[in-house]
Image (cartoon, grey):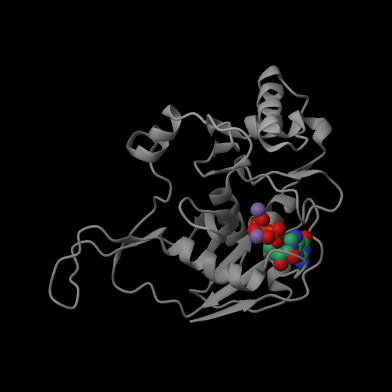
Amino acid sequence: MNAIGIEGLPEVRPGDDVAALIEERTTLRDDDVVCVASTIVSKAEDRAFDLSAFPASERARSIADRLEAISGEEKDPRFAQAVIEESDELVLEAPFILAATTFGHVAPNAGIDRSNVPDDDLLLLPEAPSASAARIRSNLDADVGVVVTDTCGRCFRHGQTGVAIGYDGISATRDWRGETDRDGHELEVTNESIVDELAGTANLITGEGDDGIPIVVVRDFEFGAHDGSENLFRDVDDDLVRDALRDWSFEGGST
Ligand code: GDP
Ligand code: MN
Ligand code: MN
C-alpha cells in the first residue's frame, strides 16, 4: 500500500471543486482511496465564519463563564454559541465542551477549527461529511473511495490522530467476526474501522501546520474478502460511555 500526498494545492476558496483540484494534479486509479482533510472541504463549502455570526445566547454565556473560571483564560461566548448551533447534544459542558455534531461525530467543540483559516475566526466542519465525500466522488472519473478526515483527540490516550468523519464508496469497517485466528479460534468482536485507519495514515502525510497537503491518495489498500459495515458512529442508545458522561459533572476547579 502507498500513501501519496498531493502537492501544490492552492488555498481553497468557497465554491472550489475539490475533485477538479485533485484531477488537475494527479491521475487517480480505480480502487484508490482519496483522503481529504475536512478543513478544505469546509472551505470549499463556505463554512468559514466570523464570530459575529454567532450572537451569544444565555446558555452560551453561562458555558463560557464557567470555562473561563475553570481555565483562567478568556472564553468568547460566541464560540460556545457556534458549538451549540453545530450540535445535537453537548455531552459535556466542562471542563471542555464535548459535542455530538448533527451528523453523529462526537468531538471537542464540535470539531470547530481555529487554525488554517486565513480570513475568518472559525471553520465549522462540513454539514454532512459523507454527503460531501459522495459529491467529491461523483465528480471524479476513477471509481475511488473518498474519506473526509479530521484530526481528533481520543479518550484515555495522549495525542491526536486523523479520524474519518465522512466517507463514500468504501465500507466504514472490515468485519472479522466469524473468521478465525491462527489457532482456529473464532473472532467474536473485531470489526476494524478501516476508514479511521486510512484517515490516520493520511494524517501522517498531511501534518497539522503549514504543510499545505490536505489530500492524500492511498493506493493498493486491499480490503480483502470480508464483510463490511456502513456504520461508524455508535447509536446513541447503545453508547454506554456517552450515557455515563451525561450523568457525570465536572466538580474540579482549575485544570
Ligand atoms: P484538519 O485535520 O481537517 O482539521 O486540517 P488541518 O488544519 O490539520 O490541515 C491539514 C493539512 O491541510 C495541513 O497540511 C494544512 O497545511 C493543509 N491545508 C489546510 N487548508 C489548506 C488549503 O486551503 N490549501 C492547502 N493547499 N492546504 C491546506
Ligand atoms: Mn480539524
Ligand atoms: Mn489536522
Q: Is residue 60 visible?
A: yes
Q: Is residue 109 above or below residue 133?
A: above
Q: Is residue 239 visible?
A: no
Q: Between 157 and 193, which is closer to the camera in this rendering?
A: 157
Q: Between 87 and 154, which is closer to the camera in this rendering?
A: 154
In this image, 34 relative to 70: left or right? left
Please tell me in which quadrant of the rendered image residue 209 appears.
bottom right
Which x, y percent locates residue 240? 34, 38
Which x, y percent locates residue 212? 76, 68
Which x, y percent locates residue 192? 35, 62
Please tell me in which quadrant of the rendered image residue 134 appears.
bottom right
In this image, 177 relative to 53: left or right? left
Quarter holding the C terminus is: top right
Residue at 65% of width from left, 30% of height from top? 85
Residue at 35% of width from left, 33% of height from top? 237
Which x, y percent locates residue 42? 70, 50
Please tell me in which quadrant of the rendered image residue 51 appears.
top right
Q: Is residue 152 above or below residue 62?
A: below
Residue at the outermost right position? 119
Residue at the outermost top position? 58
Q: Is residue 99 above or below residue 25?
A: above
Residue at the outermost left position? 184
Residue at 56% of width from left, 49% of height from top? 131
Give the mark count: 0
Residue at 50% of width from left, 53% of height from top? 154
